[in-house]
Amino acid sequence: MANHKATKKDTRQVAKRRERNRYYGKTTRNAIRDITSTDAKDASEKLPSVESMIDKLAKRGVIHRNKAANLKSKLAKKINTAKAAK
């Protein structure tokens, strides 16, 4: 365990950040799961908010920016094919 005052504070900060990052990551994963399970019209309306969540994760450094781009691309492609199928 840490003995220095600054190291103890750093440990507390890291734990707080980890919890926050896990919360945002899980919330975004749930939003992605929900958007893929709904119909195309509803999903296309929710797409901008989910893309915004993904961008925020990349900006915070929770996920890599290329992963964010891949997620957004896959979501858009899935929704567009679902719209075209109708």
Image (cartoon, rainbow, N blue to C red):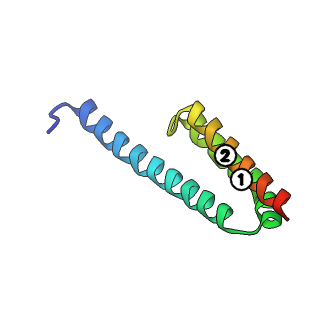
Indicate left or right for 20 with 85 as reference.
left
Q: Which residue is nearer to you in this view: 17 or 33?
A: 33
Q: Residue at x 60, y 34 (%)?
A: 59
Asked whether disc 1 touches disc 2, contact meaning CB atoms under 8 Å apart, the reply is yes
Q: Residues within 10 Å of mark 2 (few under 14, many from 20)?
A: few
Q: Residue at x 80, y 58 (%)?
A: 44
Q: Residue at x 27, y 30 (%)?
A: 6
Eyeballing the image, is 58 above or below 42?
above
Outermost front residue: 85
Q: Amino acid at mark 2?
A: Lys
Q: Which residue is nearer to you in this view: 68 or 20?
A: 68
Can you give x and y, in whole percent of width and height, for residue 54 in the image?
A: 63, 45
Q: Residue at x 69, y 53 (%)?
A: 50
Which secondary structure lies at badge 1? Answer: helix
Can you give x and y, in whole percent of width and height, for residue 24 in the image?
A: 53, 52
Identify the image quadrant of residue 35. bottom right
Can you give x and y, in whole percent of width and height, for residue 4 in the image?
A: 19, 30
Quarter of the picture containing the C terminus is: bottom right
Write down the residue under mark 1. Answer: 78
Quarter of the picture containing the N terminus is: top left
Identify the image quadrant of residue 70. top right
Write down the residue under mark 2. Answer: 74
Which secondary structure lies at badge 2? Answer: helix
